[in-house]
Image: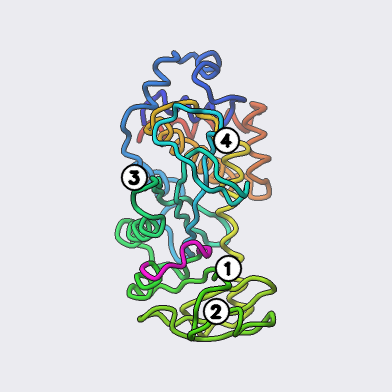
Amino acid sequence: MPAPLVCYIRGLLQGFSCSATSLSRQFAWSHDQLTRSLRKRFAWCTFWRWLILTLFGPLKDGWLIIDDTIIAKPYGKLFAQASYVYSSVLGKSVKGYDVVLLCWSNGKITVPLAWCWYKKGGKTKNTLARELLSVAKHTWKLKPNMILFDAWYMEKHLINWLTVNHWRFVCRCRSNRVLNACPVWQDLPVSGDEVVGWITWQTRVKVIRDDNRFLATNDPTLSVMEICEWYARRWPIEDIFRMTKSKLHLEECQGRSLRAQQTHWGTVLTAYVILLHQKVTKHPTKTLYQLHEAWMMRTNLSRSASRYYYQVLGTA
């Protein structure tokens, strides 16, 4: 990894701002070096697989989680390819970028594996999700116990692809989704009810009602409680989005080019993985927020850890 990007990651972990001006003052790299490094092409796919295998080793068992997040840029008019996208958190459309993320989890750690940037007018999010799952299958050689996603990705091409590849899934289902010739809410009036039927021409699913939400799976042998437990395991990806936005400056990059924004995204996830590895190997009782605070305060913990991780990144 280029030295300016290593410095940039250090700034994300230890700085109060990720602007090139503040980082150049704090870490003695020139402003132009930092901005140029953000605009240069970098082989993130190759680097990311090397980094995860170096820090965590081969990923076995576990499950995969798919979701997308909005990188809001409401006050900038010159960000390349930024468009108005709907934010479910804000409940309205905002200007920014939409990124589809695939994560692997085993209940103890949740690791980002691959991502795609959604472009309005380009490939749909469901198509990007299938491409990410193909990466998990062919590049990472994973055999997940389950695929978890929300109602947005319950689309026939995706669930047929999962069925053909013999991968089980649990997802949220819209109440008006037609199953057995009628909306599921009509067949499931009470919490705990369940119904089985063909959702597409080749996928048979079981849909259950849990309070006011409907959950679906292509494994009819799962009980209502098991389906709810599996869907609850989707939540760690939301923790990644919250952590990167609130502590690791995900939405603060002022680079106007799309490549600069994409490089910033990769460095933010690298900073997240460093904190995750530190938690797993050294401080399992601490939260990621507590570890990040230690880096910010420049305690002995952060100084000793930083040398190791910067050496690792420097060999990539």
Question: Residue, x 37% and y 24% (percent of image)?
Answer: 37
Badge 3 marks a residue whose secondary structure is helix
Q: Which of the marked residues, 4 or 3, is nearer the chain's N terminus?
A: 3
Q: Which of the marked residues, 2 or 3, is nearer the chain's N terminus?
A: 3
Question: Residue, x 56% and y 86% (percent of image)?
Answer: 195
Q: Which of the marked residues, 2 or 1, is nearer the chain's N terminus?
A: 2
The residue under label 4 is 248
Q: Which of the marked residues, 2 or 4, is nearer the chain's N terminus?
A: 2
State if disc 4 and disc 2 touch (CB < 8 Å). Answer: no
The magenta region covers 149-157
Disc 3 packing (10 Å; few <14; some 14–19; many ≥20): some
Foreground residue among 284 and 153: 153
The residue under label 2 is 183
The residue under label 3 is 45
Disc 1 packing (10 Å; few <14; some 14–19; many ≥20): many
Q: Quadrant of the N terminus?
A: top left
Disc 2 packing (10 Å; few <14; some 14–19; many ≥20): some
Above or below residue 311? Residue 44 is below
State if disc 1 and disc 3 touch (CB < 8 Å). Answer: no
The residue under label 1 is 231
Question: Residue, x 47% and y 69% (percent of image)?
Answer: 146
State if disc 1 and disc 2 touch (CB < 8 Å). Answer: no
User: Does the rendering let one see residue 312?
Assistant: no
Badge 2 marks a residue whose secondary structure is strand
User: Does the rendering let one see residue 231?
Assistant: yes
